[in-house]
Amino acid sequence: MKTIFFDVDNQLDFLYPAGALHVPGAELLLPAFARLTQFAKSQHLQILSTADAHSEDDPEFKTWKPHCVAGTTGQQKATATLLGSPLQSIPSTPGAPMPIDAAQILIEKQHTDCFTNPNLEPLLTKIAADRYVVYGVVTEICVSHALFGLLKTGARVELVTDAVRHLNEDSCNQMIKRFEAAGGALTTVSSVT
């Protein structure tokens, strides 16, 4: 069974209290992210990481305050989520090169839905995973888009419930019920590692 870890938006602006769009309590997840990353490294599992890469005047800033502007410190991924090997990026430009064999691939996005990057679906088709293990922030927004998009691949999709953080508990709980009803599974860091 080919397993891929799917790391959603674990960037400094979201994870740390000083970040531009801090998710309350997200900094407490860093040990969980580190454990998942080290496990992936030890088992030679590929990690697909999504990351906001906004322009300074991004239209998304009409909904959310400015965050993860490309090239800023806040846009960088947390060290705990990096394998240490060169990070291969796939921009949102249609037809961008796809380094499918890289240990960790960064899927850039300008919207809450990672599947708005036109290269993600072709990448997933080429990778042909049987199982995706998903974690990151924000559960009911960006993580939700990733989960439901990955379910469309037909692979098993697991949400690591102790390696995600939400903004709205009710919305999060409703999303998790929809995810399970659609065939998704719940797991924990200790079960995965």
Image (spheres, grey):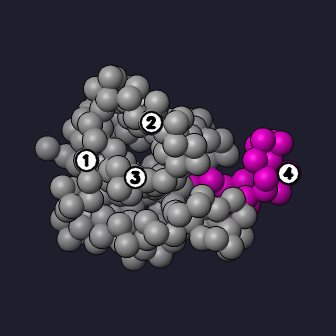
- Say which mark, if any, is on residue 173: 2
Residue that extends furthest to the left in the rendered view of this protein: 1
Determine whether, in the image, residue 156 is placed left or right of residue 75: left
Q: Amino acid at mark 4?
A: Asp
Q: Which residue is mark 3?
A: 135
Mark 3 and mark 2 residues within 8 Å of each other at the beta carbon: no
Query: What is the CA distance from the residue labelled 1 to the residue labelled 3?
Result: 10 Å
Q: Which residue is mark 4?
A: 57
Lower position in the chain sequence, tag 1 or tag 4: 4
Q: Amino acid at mark 3?
A: Tyr
Q: Amino acid at mark 1?
A: Thr
Report the magenta residues as a range: 51-70
Discs 1/3, front: 1
Going 52% across and 63% down the picture, which residue do you hit? 26
User: Which structural element holds mark 3?
Assistant: strand
Quadrant of the frame with the C terminus:
bottom left
